[in-house]
Amino acid sequence: MLKVEHISKVYQSGDRQLQVLHNINFEVPDGQVCAIVGPSGSGKTTLLGLCAGLDHPTEGEISIAGRSLKNKSEDELAAIRNELVGFVFQSFQLIPTLTALENVMVPMELRGARNVSSEAKELLQKVGLGDRMHHYPTQLSGGEQQRVAIARAFINKPVLLFADEPTGNLDTDTSESIEQLLFDLNKDAGTTLVLVTHDLELAAKTHRIIRLRNGHVASDTLIHAVEAELA
Amino acid sequence: MSFNPFIWKMAWRESRGSLSRLLLFVSSIVLGVAALVSITSFGDNLDKAIDQQAKTLLGADLEIDGRMEFPPEMEALFDSIGGEQAREVRFSSMVLFPSTGGTRLAQIRAVSGNFPFYGELETSPSDVLDEFRAYKDKALVDETMMMQYGLSIGDSIRVGNLTFEIIAKLISIPGESLAQSITGPRVFISGDILDETGLIQRGSQLYYSQYFKFDDDRDVEALVKEIEPVLEANRFDADTVEDRKRSLGRSMTNLTNFLNLVGFVALLLGGLGIASSIHVYIQRKVDTVAVLRCVGTSTKNAILIYVIQATAMGMIGAIIGSFIGLGVQHVVPLILADFLPIEIEFGISWYAVISGLLIGMTITALFALQPLLAIRKISPLRAIRRNVDQDDSITRDPLRWAIFAIIGLGIMLTAVALTGDLKTGSGFFAAIVIVFGLLILIGTGIITLSRRFFPSRSSYVVRQGIANLFRPNNQTLVMIITLGFGTFLISTLFLTRDMLLEQIETTSFENQANLVMYDIQTDQKDGIRGIIDSYGLEISQDVPIVTMRMTHINGETVEALRDSGDVRIPNWLYRREVRATYREQITDSEKIVEGTYTSFFDDFDGLVPISLEVEVAKSMGVGLGDEFTFNVQGIPMQGVVTSLREVNWQQVQPNFIFTFPDGILNDAPQFHVFVTFAPDREISAQVQQEIITNYGNVSIIDLALILNIVDNILGRVSFVIQFMAMFSVITGLIVLSGAVIASRFQRMRESVLLKTLGARSRQVLRIMSVEYAVLGIMSALTGIILSLIGAWALAWFVFEATFIPNMSTVVFMLLIVVFLTIGIGHLNSRDIYRRSPLEVLRSDG
């Protein structure tokens, strides 16, 4: 599903060059839930951005569902994201001027789909916000906003979901419920999930942990319980 | 524009939470559109009024006029033309008010017949015209003069040797504006007794008009063509209703075009305000755009969402502006009352409304484009990482330069459309580019100096206040330009007016002359000299004037030369008598630039050496060695140009185009001009009164009168321009309000942080006051510096005067702008600083 080949990323900072990622290689098969962990500055967010087509690597190639992201223009990448990818952000990233329902509908409306509201309502019901669909983000708590963001991430039935510290801005209780919701929905949808986190407890709930350190893959481990299940 | 429904839905949804902010931004263009619609609508209604009331403009179907008495050939022509006829003889003369002893130079209109045939002389009381025409000793006197001199109905007015009874105030004359009475208030008397006034003397400058009314449907234009040869031969001119319509239409068009351009400037300032506001608006939408890009919105669609918002807001602003403009158009005639010769009825001019809408929306779209381009640079990566670098450099973005070029072209085309003339529109565009370029230069210079010479030793309040002007995404330069431009306009007007008045006063003082007496006959000289001597005054100049007609140039008749165009003879020189003088040497106001001045010449058979004014020579295309023939009271005299003179026409004294050497004209029929200096108003009034009482044909110009007239005219003109310039000033204040409100969130956070750290409300308020005071000073200085440059340029290139700025005007403008800026800032920020931090954060989310 997600193929990362020889990925390197170098940033120009003034007259210095800063290499953030060094020759990263891995593949995430369909349906797998994979966590990318590492300390601050290890390159996790950079790697997430590259995998999602939000940025271009300095070297290497990334493919999603067999479609290479190499040499694609910004608009071509946007189209690929709309078609294949879903996002859950640490800071929720809801559009403040849209209601919960309207936020969820955005990815489908971008495709030109009509009559999306019933589907969006269904998803909001699923995430427990059936009675808050006409509220604006400022009227929702952090946990509720993240639920809306999760519903938005699943509306276009993505093949690949990226979650960047999805519980980073939430308290413990809320985090747990959000994590559960994310995993449940993901299982129902059969989506491949790539989770970036520094929370090892959360990472342990996934099928696989890729550990980054100083821009390198320090380890790539299948969690044994999952390994058995997959077997 | 794409019909992707998502874009339109997003544009609407996205604007819901920001409607009030967007509407405030758009208010920047409301006044500019209002100004354009009001002036264009007024102009449209004025054209209709001119068309409907065309005959009243002339008061007749045909007017034949000239600067000499109608000779027998012309009288015969009048007989042959037929129709109902009236005659008017017009000239300037002193009038005396026996009841008060006051004197004034007035415009005497001696009328015979039932003129005006169309329209009415508006008088108070109104039903006096029959009495006026029946009795020859009645006068109609300009209302303003009656007020000035405290006259009433029934009082007397002495014109020349005759005394008339004032039977009515003259309020308006069809086809003439009030402004025309400023230079000479009008006095109507009967033309039948004009000779008895004794004012028709040698040297009197009289203007003769014969008016015709036709009851048949004759083609007046064809008639004029038919009689043209006779008119030309006798040096008379014909004026028809169509001529007057065209002439008035041209003047009014020039006036409305000028006012439209001033209004257009307000719109351009509003455009700057929009660009600035949208820039700030987009900065707040960066995260939203990043998310949209993340979930799959293309760059084009992301830009289109906000283009739709900007265009919609532009349309709303233009509609509001149009409504206001239709209301303001009723005020325009009141502002222009002094310059309008007809009554105007108002209707809605759809042409004005539609053109205002289109221009308003175009300006909005053009100025919004530039900041909207920044959306291209918003990376979707920003959704997960805040510190993503955006390459916002203008120099590396060719599309932005293309947008600038489109904006420039749009402005130029709009200016051409408003003026209907490519040259004027292009000239205006060039002037705008220069002015705005200079404003940016001066504004940037002031900002740079403020940063370089930052008052680091000042108190925290002062330092923070000044530093606030340079906060990220500040709109300081835009505000300086918009406020500065309004300051520049108003300041230039005041400075120029002060300069012109100062010029007259200074010139007179240097010249030691403030009284000029003319139309003095030779046999009156001793008597008048005696009166002047009796008051202890000295006659600084005794100037003889000989009237003559120019008949030939280099052996060709002037008529032939007019037809051939070999020599460009100006109309005023062709149609009237030349007034020349003779003297041994040139005066202080003259300088020989070519040739040699001849002091004395008395060979009546030879070619008389004459001196010609250099600018007139250039305009005619003549020079040294060219020969002129004059008819001097029936005697031909041939002269040759032997010197060219530069004349300072601004000196308060008689100046001449042609001068002759002493000796040749001494015995010619002539009249005289005395120039003297009266040390105070009282003596000046007494001298004038005694001379007029004894010598009614003499006219006197005193400096106080000139100053009064010039001040009056300048005051009325500048009032009109100031009214239009106020649109620019108020737009500048609206832009300032918009900028303050746009930065509200930042200010709020700053205030919250300061209060959290222990600052009291008063301290926070003082910081804000310092910020706005400095902004006001910067804006005022920018505008004032540019206005000093502008006024100097006007003085040097246009008025040829010395420019000494009036510092009280400069200080006044500075203070006004600073106080207004502080006031606007306080008005829009007061709640942030009064409420508690938590309260503010909760209410504003």
Image (cartoon, rainbow, N blue to C red):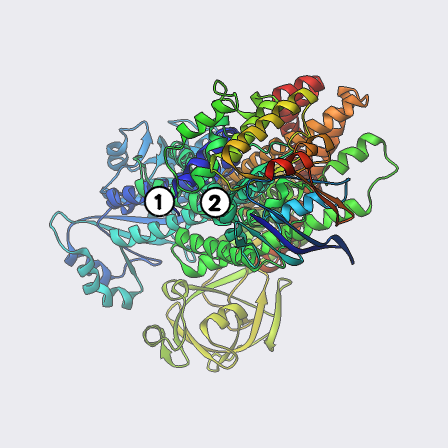
Question: Residue B497: in sight, yes or no?
Answer: no
Q: Which amino acid type corresponds to the residue marked 1 in the rendered image?
A: Arg
Q: Position of residue B604 (x, y in %)?
A: 47, 79
| Count of marks placed on residues | 2
Residue on which the image places disc 2: A83
Residue drawn at point x = 39 percent, y = 78 percent? B566
Quadrant containing the C terminus of chain A in the rendered view: top right
| Subunit of label 1 | B
Please give left or right for residue B778 compared with residue B321 in the image: right
Q: Position of residue B291 (x, y in %)?
A: 56, 39
Q: Tag 1, which secondary structure?
A: strand
**Please, is residue B621 above or below residue B727 in the view?**
below
Which dot marks residue B674? Answer: none
* Closer to viewer: mark 2 or mark 1: 2
| Subunit of label 2 | A
**Would you say the residues marked 2 and 1 are in contact, meaning their CB atoms lie under 8 Å apart?**
no
Question: Residue B354: in sight, yes or no?
Answer: yes
**Crowd tier of the residue under label 1, counting other residues whose Cα lies within 10 Å: few below 14, some 14–19, many 20 or above:** many
Residue drawn at point x = 53 percent, y = 77 percent? B602
Residue drawn at point x = 76 percent, y = 37 percent? B466
Which residue sits furthest left?
B216
**Residue A115 sits in which quadrant?**
top left
Q: Tag 2, which secondary structure?
A: helix
Quote the CA–CA distance across marks 2 and 1.
89 Å
Residue on which the image places disc 1: B109
Q: Which amino acid type corresponds to the residue marked 2 in the rendered image?
A: Glu
Q: Are the residues under marks 2 and 1 on the same chain?
A: no
**Please, is residue B658 above or below residue B184 in the view?**
below
Please give left or right for residue B713 compared with residue B319 in the image: right
**Crowd tier of the residue under label 2, counting other residues whose Cα lies within 10 Å: few below 14, some 14–19, many 20 or above:** many
Q: Position of residue B531 (x, y in %)?
A: 58, 45
